[in-house]
Amino acid sequence: MNEAACRICRGEALPDDPLYYPCKCTGTIKYVHETCLKEWLEHSGKPAKCELCGHAFRYQSVTRDSIPRHPPLWLLLQTAFASSLMTIKNISLLLTALSMWLFWLPAFVRLLAVQFLQEEAPQTIIADMLANIFLACSEVFSGSALTSKALVPAKELARFVGEGITVTALCFLVVLITLLVNEWTAENMILLQNNNGFNEEDDDDDDDDDEEDDEAEQFRQNMPIFNRQAAFPDLMNDPALLPPEPPAWNAGNRNDMNDDINAELAMGILEFLHLLGPLKELIKSVVASMLIIGVTLYIAVCMPSYLFKMVSRVFYIPTILLTYFPLKTAHAFYSLSKAVLLACISLTSASINGLGLAVFGCKLVPETLINFEGLRKEISDLAWSAIATALPDIDRTLTLTQALHQIRKDRNSWAAVFHGGVIPKETTIYDILFADCCVYIGIALFSCLVLAFARIARKFNSNLIRGNGFIHFVQRFARYNQHLRIIWFLSIELILFPLGCGILIRLALFPLMSPLKSSQSVTEMLSLSFSFKPMFLHWVVGTCYMFFLANFVSHFRRIMRKGVLYFIRDQHDPSFHPFREIFTNSVLQLLRKIGVSAIMYAVLIMFGVGFFAVMVQSTSYVLFGRPFMIVFSGPLFSTPLDLIMCYFTACNVYCMSYLGTVNETIWLVYLDHVCHSLRLSEFILNRKVADEVGSFHYRSLWDRLTLKDSGSLVVSDNLDWSKTTSRSLFILEGSFMRAPAADNMDLEDNAILFIPVDTDDKPIDPKHTPALLKNKQIAPYDVVYRPPFFKTRCLILLLLIFGFTGGLLVLGLFAPIIAGRIFVPETCENDIYAFVVGMFIISQSMTIYAALFSNCVRQSMVDLSHSHAPKTLWIFGLRFAHYALRMSFLTDSISTLMRYGLHFLLLRVVIPLELATLLTLYVRIPLSSFADSTLETIDLMQDFYYCFIFVEVAFNILVLSERLDESYTNELLVYLKGTINELKYGKLFWALVSISLKCMLFIAVPVIAIAIKLYSYGPLTVPEGRSVLYQCALTMIGLAILRGIAILVDHWEYKTFERMSIIKRKLLNIDEYEPERAN
Amino acid sequence: MQKSSTASRRLLKEYKQLLTDTPDGISAGPIDENNMFEWECIIQGPDGTPYEGGVFPAILKFPSDYPLNPPTMKFTTPLFHPNVYQDGTVCISILHPPGDDPHMYETAAERWSPIQSVEKILLSVMSMLSEPNPESGANIDACKMFRDDLPGFKAVVRTNIRQSLGL
């Protein structure tokens, strides 16, 4: 080897990659490529000196002597022209792409949805919200509110497209989940890597005929998904494997430009939106997506609903025999189909909440640009629809939205509510926010100026010859350039970002903020006044949250282009060195990174925290029977302590301390529940009382009871006892208060009496209460009628509330870490998978725990409010045991996961279970409208879910204990991937057999679970404690038997496949199933 | 993709180099021409050592980011040596990846760097055979025996070699 060769890659000098000799070594190891050396230094993390001769490598930028002092004019013009052309091209491409994805595709999908779903198209709430968002955007861009006439078609169109977007997003969600599963298995099945799948054109042709049986549909569903994986491999693969070259459409022009930042920026955005490729490719991919979405829509949305319809019809006949209430049961089953749809919609609407709030944030621009009245209306729409969609119970949502519409009709009163009635004209919240924005913009502008100057200085420094006096000055300045850059970027990272995070969190928590009560609340709740203390607190919480978030996002980062998420780097990445990046990368590149990071943060916060807030609110609805509001009071009022780190406990404490005493708050909650359970529906206030100042308290009390949704507030001059019913709650001020059942009772001043009724609506004789009533020391608002064990109940409630919040707090703090470190095995390389799994686990486990606790509390409270205390205490105990049992199943599955930490467990257990949870948690909601009490249905669906967990865990433990070795794991993966392999070999029949078997199992298990459950429940009545245990046992036994059969079938299928694969191997004379060794 | 093609190109070059200029007592090459990342090599026991007359086949496995990370080497026949694990994996400093040397008892020149090559690795292994290093032992029994009972050690080595040669 006489030729000079690189000592690292052993390659020769290339025209664009010459060889250097950066140290004192000679001989065959004299030369090295710059890229190779850099790569090695970055990889080894050692100081930049030669290992052998110890000479420190030196770099110096060398300029030729002949370089001109100034760039020639024609070159400048040429470059400017080229870059402007490039920018125009990129922008037009981006616009086309966005219109494709945001308008044409959704519109098409909406059309499809109309075809498929008929009257069941996504309904008003989301559409309204989306229309509002669209209008808000148009408002911002057009600078003024659209006139009402112009609004109508625009709103219609916006609604149409908005619904389309909803459905599209849903379909993408389905595709994404399946894709992830596919991706994960493909990663473990390396033999699939060489197989680049099917031909796209064939696939497109195939998708046109939809009328097949569902097995064939599902089989076909796999194909486009598999294709997409092949089509976008760069999204899913490790960034290290990304081809460094940009795609072809951009490559031709890149050479013309020295510093193609604009193109790179556009590329980044396009890549962020997956919009790579020229126009033709884009249209092709949109068309392909249309077909895919069509099929997915059909499979994911229509098939289940048809299936459920079919099931409900099939079940109609046996349920006549099984129960005495066939109609109700059948109806319940029938509603499942709609429930799935509604579940999907509500899930999406939850995420859209985040979007809406983001728009809300975007809209905070100076008054001169937009119409304030219109803006306020839009904001109110957004906010209220956000609150409305947050509530799990659709019926209640509708009621609430109706109520809200009522409020909105009266614009003045609404404005009064929203602004707390006391906002002075001069300082609205927008003004305050605008002031803040101005400050930020000012900081940014100043920093930009500094940077621009520094940039110019750097250019001078590198390009011009020394000796000039001016250059001397510039050079001296350039020395400070480095420090300036550090300061500037650190200020962004340490100050601007956390501040922004804090403010965003504040906005994201908007659904939790109560616009009620205190007169000054809204102003100060949303005020981000630029005083030190709130800003400092924003900063603190933002910093905490950023670190909190960074754990998550470090997973997410890897699927992006390398180095895109500059501020969210993986701490364990050895190549990460913030200062080095600040020095080596160009300013625009850094700015681009910051921009993308900011967008990512905003999206994550809006999505994560908003979703979180909505989730808390929905669980709180179950717990308290009313939306959970953050109540601010006292000196803490202006602080953003509601933020994510502490707000769980804090808001409860505030809520407790709101009225001054904990006891009273609990009593209020308790009163609410009791009023519900006793079906009190009227609240009668004497006119005389209502006119006085003290009546405010009664009115506010009334306002805070959820009773008002179904009841009424009556203000009467003279109480007419004959018109009252036993469902009335009487409040009188004066010498006494009375009710039909308590005519002879002498009551104290300011006393509240509610008359308990039994199940037949007959008043219970409160003869055991007079002793209390005759006590002259009763304070205002005290409970006259104290049910037995009142203190115990209060204690239980208090404990449960704090247990609930404490548990959520702990989960919220540690669950991401646990999920990151334990649930996702270290060897799992695909981080998007890890990310999704982590999100699933956290959100779902939190929802489950919250729902469990709240259900328990609610049930026990309602039960205890009847005066059959000893009996209900038994039931309470049994229920608690029941829930504990269920919890232990959950814990079991989690601990199994933790113990083995195996990939296939995640695949086999977590994903299906979490999907099932999502379904069950949402499915149960509309069902509640059919039952007198929601408790049975909730029980039913939860048992459904926990049975799933139980059998899956049992099955997996069985598998693990039987043969837990590597070869079996591989074989298991082969088995899981069997369908695709069979497709690969063209064995359609076997693929269909295996898919239909899996489908059968998946459907049969829950169906039989429900059947057993229904049978054991009998008609939907309030379950007694014993029957709860009985049906539990029955369900478990039935499912164990069923799963036994399932295991047998599984094994049979597995063995069949194994035999088949051996035969195939022999026939083809290849060793297909030997996994390739990557290392 | 990029990295592994760099690696295979370099490995091909190294292979050609080895073919043209093979040092004594060593022969090495990829098992399969299509897969450059797995080599088989044969090392003769150096003269004047207990391993004299022995022939030791081993498998070299290269990572996909070679030469940034070193290959692993594993003898396929049992070899009783203080620096060879029971399963045949060789433990010498040149094969240690960069960056995991907490004690810093190996100088930078001894450790893996892209400057090294297959040839150098094999030469180092040969010198390891002639001069075992019981300080950083991999086979504790062998270390103990080498330090305390040199004649016994030699005897065991001889028996092993005879067994592996089928004598």
Image (tube, helix red, strand yellow):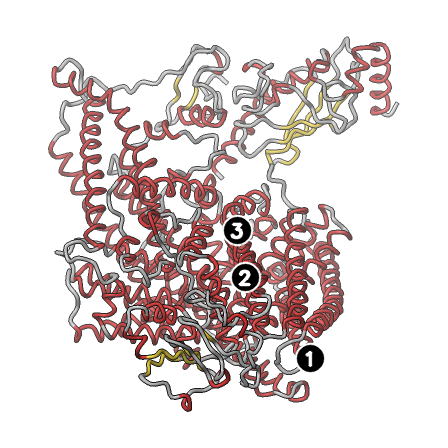
In the displayed structure, does residue A461 sit left or right of residue A399? left
Residues marked 1 and 2 touching at CB (< 8 Å): no
Residues marked 1 and 3 touching at CB (< 8 Å): no
- Give coordinates of residue B106: x percent, y percent: 59, 15
Q: Is residue B93 above or below residue A609?
A: above
Residue marked by disc 2: A794
Q: Nearer the viewer, mark 2 or mark 3?
A: 2
Q: Is residue A834 above or below residue A444?
A: below
Lower sequence index among marks 1 and 2: 2
Determine the CA span between mark 2 and mark 3.
Answer: 18 Å
- Give coordinates of residue A985: x percent, y percent: 62, 61
Residue marked by disc 3: A806
Residue type of the residue flagged with mark 1: Tyr
- The chain ID associated with circle 1 is A
User: How would you rate the neighbour count of disc 2 (Cα within 10 Å): few for under 14, some for 14-19, many for 20 or more?
Assistant: some
Query: Residues at marks 1 and 2, common chain?
Result: yes
Residue that appears at 35% across and 47% down: A636
